[in-house]
């Protein structure tokens, strides 16, 4: 059985990350992921700009191209509605479909909303149908971090990031909540802020204490200037090893604690990782669509739900509490 998809928004994640139709092993955009998925059929594409219509037609010659999403509101033949527009447009677009009983899943880019109040204003008819595209949630290497930390005690977490606490930082917040069971913030202090990503999203240095399994764990957000270089790194220090995720490495690396070869009374992390679990960042959005298919077929539970996103935003706004 094929599932019908409609896509609103043809920016980078919607289309432009994948102009190459011939490479069957990569999907970095919604268009390419839908194209490669054998059980999905793209029925409608919406964008206010028709510049990329020709490129879309390369992937889907029969797709209906629209410039106004409101023409989809009453459609009965949409199973999955994917919204890949700027964050500040999400609420108005999403909430306009609150009376459509035929759409089974709303696949949303993160963060879900620009304004905190929108989370409480959203129709109940939509909340239970939302899947948020935090792509790392769909990769086994990231999911297995939690299994590994349950075998030891966590001592410290260090996050290096850029491009705004809400934009790129939300990915790291999501990893914290995924790994540490929607972590509870005990205390936090904003130390300084770095280069702005935009006027509404600073990149902060923050010291946080979270509680996990009755233990207080220090967590550091370290900001970097995205105009100089891009860095996303998530490092967990435990009593037996260091777990390191660096975005550009596409892997989760495990470093054991060993005796220093020259000074045996000292202990250090081994130079080379004892275990490396590779990620496939080229197909994470494709995995997300497979997960959505399985939710609809009732084969899996939603692992990136509205409740998960709300927990991320609760964490985010708690960190910013006291700032102007």
Image (cartoon, rainbow, N blue to C red):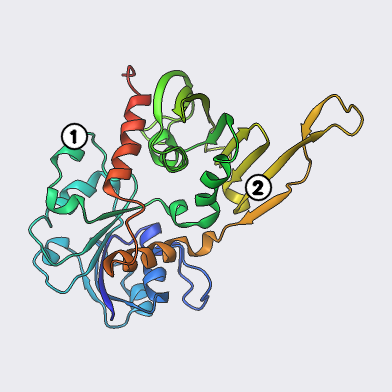
Q: Residue at x 38, y 68 (%)?
A: 290
Q: Residue 226 in the image: state x and y as whole percent.
A: 52, 38
* Left or right, residue 188 beside residue 323: right
Instruction: Note whether residue 109 is visible.
Output: yes
Q: Residue 128 in the image: state x and y as whole percent.
A: 21, 53
Reply above or below: 35 against 239: below
Question: Which residue, given by chain and number where applicable, does mark 1 sit on?
Answer: 117
Reply above or below: 194 against 173: above
Reply above or below: 297 against 264: below
Which secondary structure lies at badge 1? loop
Quadrant holding the C terminus: top left
| C-alpha span from label 1 to label 2 | 39 Å
Q: Residue at x 32, y 16 (%)?
A: 322
Q: Which of disc 2 and disc 1 is earlier in sequence?
A: 1
Reply above or below: 263 against 2: above
Residue 312 figure quarter = top left
Q: Residue 58 in the image: state x and y as whole percent.
A: 38, 79
Quadrant holding the N terminus: bottom left
Which secondary structure lies at badge 2? strand
Nearest the eye: 164 or 318: 318
Q: Residue at x 60, y 36 (%)?
A: 152
Question: Which residue, given by chain and number where applicable, does mark 2 sit on?
Answer: 253
Instruction: Note whether residue 200 is visible.
Output: no
* Left or right, residue 229 beside residue 310: right
Disc sitting over residue 23 in the figure: none
């Amino acid at each position: 059985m094929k599932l019908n998809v409609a896509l609103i928004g043809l920016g980078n994640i919607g289309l432009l990350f994948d102009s190459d139709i011939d490479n069957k092993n990569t999907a970095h955009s919604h268009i390419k992921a839908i194209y490669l998925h054998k059980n999905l059929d793209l029925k409608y594409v919406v964008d206010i700009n028709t510049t990329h219509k020709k490129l879309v037609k390369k992937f889907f010659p029969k797709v209906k191209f629209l410039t106004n999403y409101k023409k989809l509101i009453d459609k009965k033949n949409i199973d999955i509605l994917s919204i890949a527009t700027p964050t500040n447009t999400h609420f108005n677009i999403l909430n306009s479909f609150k009376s459509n009983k035929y759409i089974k899943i709303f696949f949303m880019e993160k963060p879900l909303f620009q304004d905190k109040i929108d989370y409480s204003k959203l129709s109940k008819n939509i909340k239970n149908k939302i899947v948020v595209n935090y792509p790392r949630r769909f990769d086994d290497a990231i999911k297995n971090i939690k299994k590994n930390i349950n075998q030891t005690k966590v001592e410290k977490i260090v996050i290096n990031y850029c491009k705004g606490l809400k934009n790129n930082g939300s990915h790291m917040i999501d990893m914290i909540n995924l790994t540490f069971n929607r972590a509870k913030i005990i205390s936090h202090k904003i130390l300084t802020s770095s280069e702005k990503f935009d006027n509404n999203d600073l990149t902060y240095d923050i010291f946080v204490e979270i509680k996990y399994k009755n233990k207080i764990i220090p967590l550091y957000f370290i900001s970097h200037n995205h105009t100089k270089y891009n860095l996303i790194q998530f490092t967990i220090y435990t009593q037996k090893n260091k777990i390191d995720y660096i975005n550009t490495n596409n892997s989760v690396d495990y470093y054991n604690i060993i005796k220093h070869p020259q000074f045996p009374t000292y202990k250090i992390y081994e130079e080379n990782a004892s275990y490396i679990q590779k990620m496939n960042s080229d197909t994470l959005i494709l995995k997300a669509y497979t997960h959505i298919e399985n939710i609809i077929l009732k084969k899996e539970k939603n692992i990136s739900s509205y409740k998960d996103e709300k927990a991320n935003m609760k964490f985010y706004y708690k960190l910013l509490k006291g700032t102007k």
